[in-house]
């Protein structure tokens, strides 16, 4: 009947006209049923991505992830260098803006997830040099105050504000934030401390203090090497496939 069409590489797709009918039938089942089906389809697409990656499947996975409200996953992907280079931001931005809106729109997104959405937006706009960054950070601060959020959320917004001040040459403001954030870092994991040290080094570099940045970052480099079980000597001259078997089990990450 022409509902299914074959394309290149023997792939099968649904005819566009059938999509409209299918979405209409699905909508009749109600919101909860639609969300359950989206969750199920997202799991299928995720498994398929692991087995055979393609840009179209990644795009579908991102849309489904946004539709079911998994903003934490979208933020994680949007703030990773690999996904940034792949240009996935246009697929993610609208969902994060929707999820970061004022309380009650939508009402089912908790504050800790909303702050992650705003964090992703702030990250992207900082990279783009947009003047919207301050607005996202102000909204994050308001969420922290209203809902008495914890050290991790304070560190998220604080590090970005610290780097924003440093990029504007505000050394005093940067130093004040570093001092304010240090007690919160002590409450969190070693991974958070490493990320904080890296961000402070970036701020120092932006303020024209390369020696201070180098002094701060050198112990961090050694710590990361120890975590993954490698050394500069092993890395030099070896490609990623050669290094992978040498990695310490459970190493890596931030």
Image (cartoon, rainbow, N blue to C red):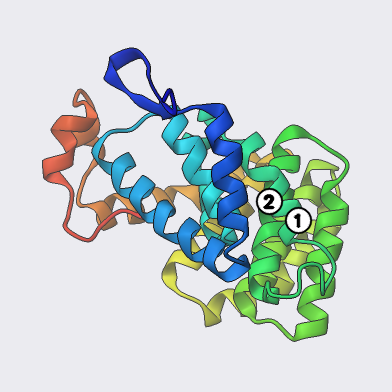
Q: Secondary structure at mark 2?
A: helix
Q: Which residue is mark 2?
A: 95
Left or right position of 86 against 4: right
Q: Residue at x 53, y 34 (%)?
A: 18
- Going by the picture, which residue comes out furthest to the front? 1
Q: Nearer the viewer, residue 51 or 116?
A: 51
Is disc 2 surrounded by few (<14), some (14 to 19) or many (20+) residues within 10 Å? many
The answer for how far apart the CA atoms under marks 1 and 2 are is 5 Å
- Of all residues shown, which one is farthest toward the bottom? 148
- What's the residue at 83%, 37% (across, down)? 130
Classify 127 as above or below 33.
Answer: above
The answer to whether the residue labelled 1 contacts the one labelled 2, judged by CB atoms less than 8 Å apart, is yes
Residue 42: % across, % down: 43, 53
Q: Which residue is mark 1?
A: 98
Residue 165 position within the rendered picture, expressed as x and y whole percent measured from the top left? 82, 51
> Which is nearer the eye, 25 or 142?
25
Q: Is residue 244 above or below residue 102?
A: above
């Amino acid at each position: 009947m022409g509902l299914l069409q074959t394309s290149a590489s023997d792939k099968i797709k649904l005819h566009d006209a059938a999509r409209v009918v299918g979405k209409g039938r699905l909508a009749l089942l109600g919101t909860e049923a639609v969300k359950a089906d989206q969750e199920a389809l997202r799991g299928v697409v995720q498994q398929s991505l692991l087995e055979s990656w393609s840009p179209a499947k990644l795009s579908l996975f991102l849309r489904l992830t946004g539709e079911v409200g998994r903003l934490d996953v979208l933020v994680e992907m949007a703030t990773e260098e690999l996904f940034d280079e792949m240009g996935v931001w246009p697929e993610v931005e609208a969902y994060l803006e929707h999820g970061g809106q004022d309380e009650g729109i939508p009402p089912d997104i908790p504050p800790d997830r909303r702050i992650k959405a705003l964090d992703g937006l702030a990250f992207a706009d900082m990279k783009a040099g947009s003047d919207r960054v301050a607005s996202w950070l102000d909204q994050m601060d308001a969420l922290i105050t209203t809902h008495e959020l914890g050290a991790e959320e304070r560190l998220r917004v604080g590090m970005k504000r610290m780097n924003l001040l440093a990029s504007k040459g505000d050394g005093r403001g940067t130093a004040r934030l570093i001092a304010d954030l240090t007690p919160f870092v002590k409450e969190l994991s070693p991974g958070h401390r490493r990320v904080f040290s890296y961000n402070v080094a970036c701020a120092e570099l932006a303020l024209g203090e390369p020696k201070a940045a180098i002094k701060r970052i050198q112990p961090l480099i050694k710590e990361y090497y120890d975590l993954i079980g490698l050394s500069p000597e092993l890395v030099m001259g070896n490609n990623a496939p050669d290094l992978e078997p040498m990695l310490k089990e459970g190493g890596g990450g931030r």
